[in-house]
Each structure stands twice: as C-alpha cells, then as structure tokens.
Image (cartoon, helix red, strand yellow):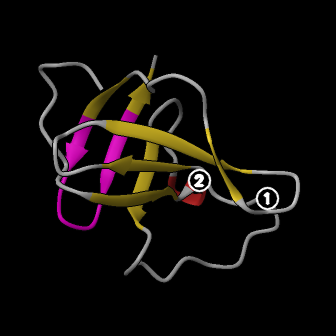
Amino acid sequence: MEPNQPSMGAGIWAHSFEEDEGDIQVYRPRATFPFPPSRRGRETLEFDPAGRVSAGMPGPDDRMMQRAGSPGFDVIEAGPDILKVRMH
C-alpha cells in the first residue's frame, strides 16, 4: 500500500473475483462475507493494526501462503464491507 493510501483497519480481506470490474479487483471481509464456493481459492490482503499490509495466496495444498514483498495498489473504493483496488 502506498503511504498516502487510507488505512483499511486491521483485518483480512479476500478477493471476490466474481465481482471484479476490468482491472479493478474487489475484496470483501473474509470473516463476515458469505463467499460462494470456489475451486481456485481466494487471494487475501491482510491489514495489521499499524497499517501494514501483506498479501496471501492459496498454496499447493490449499493452505494460505504469504506472497513475497509488499503488494502495491491504489484504493478505488473503501467501505466496511467492500474494498476495490487497482494493483500495480
């Protein structure tokens, strides 16, 4: 996340790829959103209380793995139940 981006608060957001709009990716709160089943797994963005963000992805055995490096993205829209981003 760029330093001038708004903080999303602590929590894990999962990619709701069914809702993507072109190059804009949609994320929903993993703990509360009723995602439909998916065979491909869901990438995540995790925000810690200090405002740092890390990205996760499903591994070969479906357990989540941390993606190397810090993800770069611009926040397009942010609300309590939706996060739209454009990745760099």
Vertical side of 5 occupied by 27: above or below: below
> Which is closer to the viewer, label 2 or label 1?
1
Residue at x 40%, y 58% (from the top left corner): 13
Q: Quadrant of residue 9?
A: bottom left
Residue at x 27%, y 36% (from the top left corner): 52
Mark 1 neighbour density, 10 Å: few (under 14) some (14–19) many (20 or more): few
Q: Do the residues labelled 2 and 1 touch (CB within 8 Å)?
A: yes
- Image quadrant occupied by the N terminus: top left
Residue at x 39%, y 63% (from the top left corner): 28
Residue denoted by label 1? 40
Decide which of 85, 13 is in the foreground and name it.
Answer: 13
Which stretch is magenta?
A: 76-85
Separation (CA) of disc 2 from disc 1: 10 Å
- Is 81 contained in the magenta span? yes
Residue at x 45%, y 35% (from the top left corner): 24
Decide which of 54, 73 is in the foreground and name it.
Answer: 54
- Identified by mark 2, the residue type is Phe
Q: In this view, does 74 lie to the left or right of 61?
A: left
Q: Where is residue 54 in the image (x, y as percent from the top left)?
A: 43, 38
Please tell me whether mark 1 sits on a helix, a strand or a loop. loop
- Is 78 contained in the magenta span? yes
Residue denoted by label 2? 17
Q: Where is residue 17 in the image (x, y as percent from the top left)?
A: 59, 53
Decide which of 64, 31 is in the foreground and name it.
Answer: 64
Q: Position of residue 4 (x, y in %)?
A: 11, 20
Q: Is residue 62 left or right of residue 64?
A: right
Please tell me whether mark 2 sits on a helix, a strand or a loop. helix
Vertical side of 56 occupied by 42: above or below: below
Q: How many numbered circles are shown?
A: 2
Mark 2 neighbour density, 10 Å: few (under 14) some (14–19) many (20 or more): some
